[in-house]
Amino acid sequence: ETGVTQSPTHLIKTRGQQVTLRCSSQSGHNTVSWYQQALGQGPQFIFQYYREEENGRGNFPPRFSGLQFPNYSSELNVNALELDDSALYLCASSPAGGQSETQYFGPGTRLLVL
Amino acid sequence: GESVGLHLPTLSVQEGDNSIINCAYSNSASDYFIWYKQESGKGPQFIIDIRSNMDKRQGQRVTVLLNKTVKHLSLQIAATQPGDSAVYFCAENGESNYQLIWGAGTKLIIKP
């Protein structure tokens, strides 16, 4: 069974640029959630995708957007990058929609915005 | 607003002793709670979860206790090992069925 994978592992961008992060869900899981984790803090929920539709969204601006593909993999897109977007971006998959299911996390993508 | 907090940011425990990590939550609507372990450079790893219709749940070397009266959650790790060194997060589902609300984490340090 393959776990959650994310790419790239590290990324450096400059302010104003756009970035796309990718996630492959665990085998058999149809729900993907994205989180932002600043250094020394707990993860903050960005949004969740279930069967290719956004299933819920946290307190993040519209420049954070996402996609889910038929194979349940997902992308997180961030436009007009700001310095405060520097963080670890985590993807988690679960077998069904909704947060009341155990989520399994990937290793994350470390984004640095200069 | 909604919050999940931890009483101690750092916990230092002798190898072989039991560890207890505490967590306070503020949202009475939460009915699902999870403990995650995050090692340096890695994503959070699921440890154990509990639903609000239970007050105790046991796993391998871990026990989660839920006290809904005082909105308190704890994680007990038996016979702590060096591999238990990590940051431990508690999380709750709050009023939304979509997002988990996470605390800031407790760093567990194992002394040899």
Image: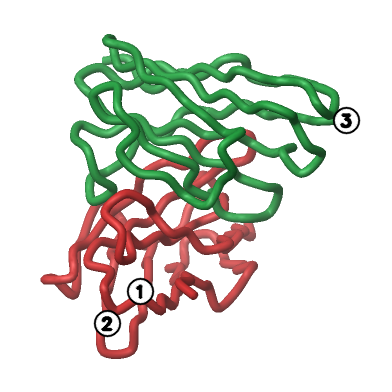
Chain A: colour as depicted: green
Badge 2: residue crowd in 10 Å (few <14, some 14–19, many ≥20): some
Chain B: colour as depicted: red
Q: CA distance from mark 1 to mark 2?
A: 6 Å
Query: Compared to B68, does A79 lie above or below?
Result: above
Q: Earlier in the sequence, mark 1 or mark 2?
A: 2
Q: Which residue carries the number 2 mark?
A: B67
Q: Which mark is residue B41?
A: none
Query: Compared to B30, does B91 lie above or below?
Result: above
Letter of the chain that mark 2 sits on in the rendering: B
Query: Compared to A74, does B46 lie above or below?
Result: below
Q: Which mark is residue B73?
A: 1
Q: Position of residue B33 (x, y in %)?
A: 30, 62
Q: CA distance from mark 2 to mark 3?
A: 45 Å
Q: Position of residue B42 (x, y in %)?
A: 56, 34
Letter of the chain that mark 1 sits on in the rendering: B
Q: Considering the numbered disc 2 on the image, is that residue within a helix, a strand or a loop? A: strand
Badges 1 and 2: C-beta atoms under 8 Å apart? yes
Which quarter of the image is occupied by the N terminus of chain A?
A: top left
Closer to viewer: mark 2 or mark 3: 3
